[in-house]
Image (cartoon, grey):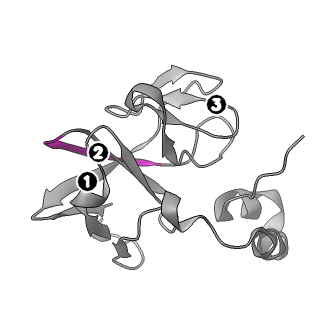
């Protein structure tokens, strides 16, 4: 059995702030090469304001970029199409943080596979799609809101 670090949401659901603080502190830093370095727009506003702004160039065509601080994965299925999803896997709450074969999104915990152009389940154990998040291109940036 292998150990993987929980995200904030999973840790809090599993036992409150003390468990979350201890578990996340023990995990240390994340791999910066695997995550985007976009800037956040602060806390999500009730009006669905800007949540994340990041360079469009950070997400390659046919690939994805995972933004750990916002728990968002941005995909770019084609040159002109940019989508964003809540990165929380609908199976067990792990973070879907990378692009797999044929441009799919893969959960590293139990290998659920999702379509990068829709968030739909390609193969389980997940049975529900990833939740879509509003994304649009603004000049050279992708802007996530909501």
User: Would residue 45 be seen by someone viewing this image from the given angle?
Assistant: no
Task: Name the mark on residue 135.
Answer: 1
Chain-order first, disc 1 or disc 2? 2
SS class of the residue under badge 2?
strand
Q: Is residue 21 visible in this depiction of the protein?
A: yes
- Pointers 1 and 2 in contact (C-beta within 8 Å): yes
Q: Is residue 110 left or right of residue 88?
A: right
Q: Residues within 10 Å of mark 3 (few under 14, many from 20)?
A: some
Q: Dot 1, how many residues are within 10 Å of its Cα: few (below 14), some (14-19), or many (20+)? A: many
In the rendered structure, are the residues bearing label 3 and label 2 in contact, judged by CB atoms less than 8 Å apart?
A: no
Residue mark closest to the camera, 3 vs 2: 3
Residue 136 % position (x, y): 19, 55
Return the residue at label 2: 83
Badges 1 and 3: C-beta atoms under 8 Å apart? no
108 inside magenta stretch: no
User: Hey, which residue is sitting farthest left in the picture?
Assistant: 139
- Quadrant location, the C terminus: bottom left
Camera-near label (1 vs 3) is 3
Residue at 59% of width from left, 37% of height from top?
90
Image check: 70 left or right of 2? Answer: left
Q: Out of 116 and 99, give the one closest to the viewer.
A: 99
First in sequence: mark 3 vs mark 2 = 2
Residue underneath mark 3: 111
Question: Which region shows up in magenta?
Answer: 79-86
Q: Image point 85% across, 45% down: which residue? A: 2
Cα gap from disc 3 to disc 2, whole angstroms: 21 Å
Q: Main secondary structure of the magenta part?
A: strand
Q: Split into 4 quadrants, where in the image is the N terminus?
A: top right
Tag 1 secondary structure: strand
Q: What separation in Å lies between label 1 and label 3 (alpha carbons)? A: 26 Å
């Amino acid at each position: 059995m292998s150990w993987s670090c929980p995200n904030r949401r999973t840790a809090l659901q599993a036992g409150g702030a003390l468990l979350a603080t201890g578990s996340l502190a023990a995990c240390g830093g994340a791999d910066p090469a695997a995550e985007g370095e976009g800037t956040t727009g602060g806390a999500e506003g009730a009006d669905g304001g800007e949540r994340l702004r990041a360079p469009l160039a950070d997400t390659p065509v046919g690939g994805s970029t995972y933004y750990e601080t916002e728990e968002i994965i941005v995909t770019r299925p084609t040159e002109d199409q940019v989508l964003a999803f809540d990165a929380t896997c609908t199976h067990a709450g792990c973070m879907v943080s990378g692009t797999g074969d044929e441009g799919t999104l893969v959960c590293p915990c139990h290998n659920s596979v999702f379509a990068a152009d829709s968030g739909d389940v390609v193969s389980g154990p997940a049975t529900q799609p990833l939740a879509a998040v509003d994304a649009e291109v603004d000049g050279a940036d992708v802007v996530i809101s909501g």
